[in-house]
Image: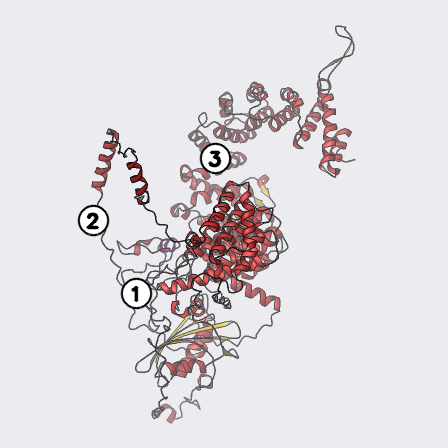
């Protein structure tokens, strides 16, 4: 039988509890045990009548201390399982006074676990703890110190304060170690008795204790106190670094090693304290870099406790002031954790990746597939941590993918806490990064349906405000109203379809939002008539389980639709009549008033419940002129005229003070701010850490301060240089900085516009880029890579990774363009529809799109409304009322080729058979398509909006400036682009600019922007996902143009 140190009764008790099948069976077992313990622990019993000197049966507690200890432990089980064991508390207090250290510790343990802080028995232990603290027996002192941390209250702290303070200087290291924790506990419960300064003073002394265990105990207190206020411990950084260095160099005794890792728990605590002290402090962090790098390298020995130290180092590196070398080392460590087969290590890797990606998103590039695999892992903890990572990685590019994944987990999860957390996160990122208002309405409605009980009412209010007030898109009132009506029609179609679907129990927030939207804008529906929607609302309003507030929303919607119809159908009249007898006074009053209007003044329904008037201001007569007739009649009947009461002295004083304040208010308008001129910003040098590089008096743009904190500099708008080979793109001047924090962070700022690069040979263009620079390197032509056959599952994972990491990693390929949903059909006017204009047809989106507008990283509280962006950009699309393009001019006849100059070396035969004939690979014809790695370019049919979005996600830029004899007009340039395999996206005749898109091999995207100047000069900029392909395409177009 196992557990030979237990009695048979105790063993049977534990066995019965473990084998119980239900809570009721467990309660019966504990009830029997309580009866047994009461009998065992009751007082002495007399065997004879009262007063007789018969023998007395001694209590087992007095005769058998071993049994007494076991009874109290069994009493502890009774308390842990939720039953009352107060009948044995006094015996625990008595056992704490025992001379046996085992019994004393058992008594203290039961008292600490069972006695509440207000229990009177605690005061009975104060004297015993004082005696034990002053004892010469080390174990008794340790037992008392443990009891102090669990039993002492604020009222009892002064009684033991002195003895605990003396224990800090005890000769036994075990006592000193426990005294540190007890002294900190006294500071927590009685800060007026043991002040914070007293604890810090003692900690400075204990930190230098000769015993490493005592020093390690002080680290726990320092960690706890530094988390509240790190400033008093800043001067200890050098000492903590010195201690950590000694630990890493194995200067501690061998007894502190665990699996060949020296004092791992002391290392983790020291590294954690350094993270607290070095956060947002560059000077303090500067001294930590070397020891953290050394600690990270030494911990990677392949054991679990080493991985724990490694994770703490990663966490500290991402917390303190950033250092590029350390961040690279942390990213390498994260990759090893993510690549492990152990689920615990993968969990640590995901946690570390979430910490480093939040401030440095470029390090996520190497882990795209690992994150996708973790998202599909069967381990629920891995999935949850991956969802946390997705939430921190969300940006305007991947928000749709992330929200779809979060909604999937909300729909399938049974964990209420997880559903509540994910619901809150979906609301946050949907409001912040919504790509369009229609998407936001659809997403929030779906969230209402699957997790409506966890949605805040403010989210529904924001959604209704967005639908009612509109987005304000467009540059004039007509376009703005048109976009708003389309949004409302989209919302009406969604809610009408849900109302007409199978009758189900919908969440309250969804029903209320649906009732309000249909009540205001049901006439916009192209699929349902007003009468159809009214019938469904009447049916749903009779659901018996509805909340009274939700029923009010439905009744109000019914009344609005009746007013829009101009008549009250029978089904609506029966519902209104039924709720005139409602127990809710407000609902009853609404229905009775509506009935009265119907019977007495039905012609007023249109004025009382107007169509689409939720945002109209209600006119208020502040003078109450409508009461003038009543007042005049009352005065004629002898009523006394109202006399304004005289102001008292207090009011006069207040009025005088207000007059003084009003007089001190300056009415002079502020001076108009001066716009910064071109070139007023200059780029800081590499390695600078603050925004000192800006001219004085110039305000930082949004996000620029964060960019400086990360060692970068904002991209400043400068005057286009005439010598620049790349065309200068005029971006919007009042949008958020795209290259700031959260946007498309580039590796570094450009000091000045670079001159156009000289044409490179084909071998150099095809050579892979070296990570060590090009000093002394010879360009070698790389062989064409052999295409790798990938499975459908692998391709799907790569597609998901591209969608997820779009906008997070600068070098990540752009996600494939999603097909835009078809706009809802415009509503057709009906006889029953009120005199409201039907929804106009959708406006062509081309008039609102800036091709290179990549300012999608600005955080917004709701789907952002577009604002007036000033003058038209160079790449703005053609307005709808622009004149038609002129027919293409006939291509001029090619000029005769000049005679080749005579080469004296070739004439003398010194070239050994070599000729200057162009290579076949560089020859191109007008109808030849561009080919890369054996695959030809195919047209990529995308819209102008998708072109502008993907332009910012492609990292490689290849400029070209050439004078062509083949291209004299924009039409000829666009024809040339189509001849090499690109798709013509748009041609802008006003500025002689055109954009095209092509794709090679299904993955390599090339976006081409060109501008044709008089005289045959062509400026081309190519954005591509593959830098080598972009260089080859530039050379190909250069040869094609010539």
Residue drawn at (67%, 33%), measured in percent from left and top?
Answer: 81
Which residue is disc 3 drawn over?
Answer: 207
Is residue 952 among the parts visible in the rendering? yes
Q: Is residue 715 magenta?
A: yes
- Foreground: 651 or 1014? 651
645 w.r.t. 1015: above or below: above
Which residue is disc 1 drawn over?
Answer: 718
Q: Is residue 832 magenta?
A: no
Is residue 435 among the parts visible in the rendering? no
* Tag count: 3
Question: Which of the two labelled residues, at mark 2 and mark 3, occupies the earlier sequence position?
Answer: 3
Contact? badges 2 and 1 (CB < 8 Å): no
Q: Residues within 10 Å of mark 2 (few under 14, many from 20)?
A: few
Q: CA distance from mark 1 to mark 3?
A: 56 Å
Secondary structure of the residue carrying tag 2 is: loop
Give the percent coordinates (x, y) of residue 797: 58, 64
Which residues are the magenta region?
Answer: 702-724
Rendered image: mark on residue 668 = 2
Contact? badges 2 and 3 (CB < 8 Å): no
Q: CA distance from mark 2 to mark 1?
A: 35 Å
Give the percent coordinates (x, y) of residue 824: 49, 66
Q: Residues within 10 Å of mark 3 (few under 14, many from 20)?
A: many
Q: Residues within 10 Å of mark 1 (few under 14, many from 20)?
A: some
Secondary structure of the residue carrying tag 1 is: loop
Q: Quadrant of the C terminus?
A: bottom left
- Foreground: 223 or 60? 60
Question: Which of the two labelled residues, at mark 1 and mark 3, occupies the earlier sequence position?
Answer: 3
Residue drawn at (28%, 37%), measured in percent from left and top?
Answer: 636
Using the rendered view, name the quadrant where residue 919 is placed: bottom left
Using the rendered view, name the quadrant where residue 908 is placed: bottom left
Question: Which of the two labelled residues, at mark 2 and mark 1, occupies the earlier sequence position?
Answer: 2
């Amino acid at each position: 039988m196992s557990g030979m140190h237990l009695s048979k009764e105790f063993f049977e008790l534990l066995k019965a509890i473990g084998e119980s099948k239900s809570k009721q069976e467990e309660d019966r077992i504990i009830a029997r045990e309580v009866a047994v313990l009461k009998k065992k622990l009751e007082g002495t019993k007399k065997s004879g009548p009262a007063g007789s000197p018969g023998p007395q049966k001694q209590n087992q507690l007095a005769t058998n201390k071993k049994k007494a200890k076991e009874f109290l432990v069994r009493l502890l089980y009774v308390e842990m399982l939720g039953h009352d064991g107060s009948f044995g508390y006094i015996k625990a207090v008595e056992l704490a006074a025992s001379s046996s250290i085992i019994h004393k510790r058992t008594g203290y343990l039961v008292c600490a676990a069972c006695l509440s802080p207000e229990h009177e028995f605690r005061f009975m232990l104060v004297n015993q703890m004082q005696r034990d603290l002053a004892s010469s027996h080390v174990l008794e002192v340790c037992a008392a110190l443990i009891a102090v941390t669990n039993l002492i209250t604020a009222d009892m702290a002064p009684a033991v304060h002195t003895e605990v303070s003396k224990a800090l200087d005890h000769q036994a290291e075990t006592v000193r170690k426990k005294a540190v924790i007890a002294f900190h506990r006294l500071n927590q419960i009685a800060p007026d008795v043991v002040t914070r300064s007293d604890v810090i003073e003692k900690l400075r002394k204990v930190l230098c204790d000769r015993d490493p265990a005592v020093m390690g105990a002080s680290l726990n207190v320092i960690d706890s106190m530094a988390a509240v206020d790190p400033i008093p411990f800043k001067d200890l950084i050098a000492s903590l670094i010195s201690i950590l260095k000694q630990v890493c160099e194995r200067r501690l005794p061998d007894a502190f090693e665990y699996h060949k890792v020296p004092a791992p728990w002391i290392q983790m605590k020291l590294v954690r304290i350094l993270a607290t002290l070095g956060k947002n402090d560059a000077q303090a962090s500067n001294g930590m870099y070397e020891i953290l790098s050394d600690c990270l390298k030494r911990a990677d020995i392949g054991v679990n406790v080493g991985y724990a130290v490694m994770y703490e180092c990663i966490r500290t590196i991402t917390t303190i002031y950033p250092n590029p070398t350390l961040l690279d080392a942390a990213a390498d460590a994260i990759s090893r954790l993510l690549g492990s087969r152990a689920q615990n290590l993968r969990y640590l890797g995901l946690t570390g990746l979430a910490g480093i990606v939040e401030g440095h998103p470029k390090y996520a590039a190497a882990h795209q597939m690992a994150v996708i695999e973790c998202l599909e892992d069967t381990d629920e903890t891995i999935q949850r941590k991956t969802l946390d990572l997705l939430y921190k990685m969300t940006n305007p590019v991947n928000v749709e993918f992330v929200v779809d994944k979060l909604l999937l987990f909300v729909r399938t999860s049974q964990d209420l806490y997880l559903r509540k957390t994910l619901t809150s996160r979906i609301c946050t990122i949907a409001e912040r990064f919504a790509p369009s208002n229609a998407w936001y309405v659809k997403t929030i409605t779906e969230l209402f349906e699957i997790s409506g009980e966890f949605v805040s009412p403010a989210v529904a209010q924001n959604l209704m405000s967005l639908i009612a007030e509109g987005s304000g898109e467009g540059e004039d009132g007509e376009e703005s109203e048109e976009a708003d009506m389309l949004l409302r029609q989209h919302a009406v179609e969604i809610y009408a379809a849900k109302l007409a679907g199978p009758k189900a129990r919908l969440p309250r927030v969804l029903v209320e939002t649906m009732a309000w939207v249909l009540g205001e804008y049901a006439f916009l529906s192209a699929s349902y008539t007003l009468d159809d929607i009214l019938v469904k609302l009447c049916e749903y309003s009779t659901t018996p389980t509805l909340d009274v507030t939700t029923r009010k929303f439905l009744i109000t919607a019914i009344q609005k639709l009746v007013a829009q119809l101009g008549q009250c159908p029978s089904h609506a009249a029966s519902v209104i009549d039924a709720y005139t007898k409602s127990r809710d006074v407000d609902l009853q009053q609404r229905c009775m008033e509506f009935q009265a209007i119907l019977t007495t003044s039905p012609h007023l329904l249109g004025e009382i419940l107007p169509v689409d008037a939720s945002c109209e201001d209600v006119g208020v007569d502040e003078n109450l002129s409508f009461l003038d007739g009543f007042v005049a009649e009352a005065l004629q009947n002898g009523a006394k005229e109202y006399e304004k009461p005289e102001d008292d002295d207090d009011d006069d004083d207040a009025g005088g003070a207000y007059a003084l304040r009003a007089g001190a208010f300056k009415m002079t308008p502020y001076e108009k701010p001066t716009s910064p001129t071109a070139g007023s910003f200059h780029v800081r040098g590499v390695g600078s850490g603050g925004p000192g590089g800006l001219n004085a008096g110039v305000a930082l743009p949004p996000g620029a301060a964060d960019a400086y904190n990360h060692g970068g500099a904002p991209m400043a708008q400068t005057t286009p240089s005439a010598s620049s080979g790349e065309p200068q793109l005029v971006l919007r001047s009042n949008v958020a900085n795209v290259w700031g924090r959260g946007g498309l962070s580039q590796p570094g700022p450009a000091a000045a516009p670079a001159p156009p690069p000289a044409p490179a040979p084909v071998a150099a263009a095809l050579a892979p880029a070296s990570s060590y620079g090009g000093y002394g390197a010879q360009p070698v032509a790389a062989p064409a890579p052999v295409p790798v056959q990938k499975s459908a599952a692998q391709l799907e994972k790569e597609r998901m990774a591209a969608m997820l990491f779009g906008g997070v990693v600068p070098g990540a390929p752009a996600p494939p363009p999603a097909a835009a949903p078809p706009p809802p059909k415009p509503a057709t006017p009906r006889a029953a529809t009120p005199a409201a204009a039907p929804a106009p047809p959708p406006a062509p989106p081309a008039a609102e799109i800036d091709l290179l507008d990549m300012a999608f990283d600005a955080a917004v509280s709701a789907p952002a409304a577009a604002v007036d962006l000033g003058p038209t950009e160079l790449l703005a699309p053609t307005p709808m009322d622009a004149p038609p393009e002129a027919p293409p001019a006939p291509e001029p006849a090619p000029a005769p080729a000049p005679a080749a100059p005579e080469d004296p070396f070739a004439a003398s035969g010194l070239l050994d058979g070599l000729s200057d004939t162009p290579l076949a690979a560089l020859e191109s014809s007008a109808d030849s398509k561009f080919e890369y790695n054996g695959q030809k370019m195919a047209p990529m049919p995308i819209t102008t909006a998708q072109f502008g979005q993907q332009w910012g996600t492609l990292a490689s830029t290849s400029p070209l400036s050439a004078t062509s004899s083949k291209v004299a007009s924009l039409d000829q340039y666009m024809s040339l682009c189509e001849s090499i395999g690109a798709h013509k996206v748009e041609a802008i005749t006003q500025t002689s600019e055109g954009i095209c898109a092509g794709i090679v091999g299904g993955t390599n995207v090339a976006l081409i922007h060109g501008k044709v100047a008089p005289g045959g000069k062509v400026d081309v900029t190519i954005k591509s996902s593959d830098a080598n392909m972009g260089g080859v395409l530039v050379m190909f177009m250069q040869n094609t143009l010539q």
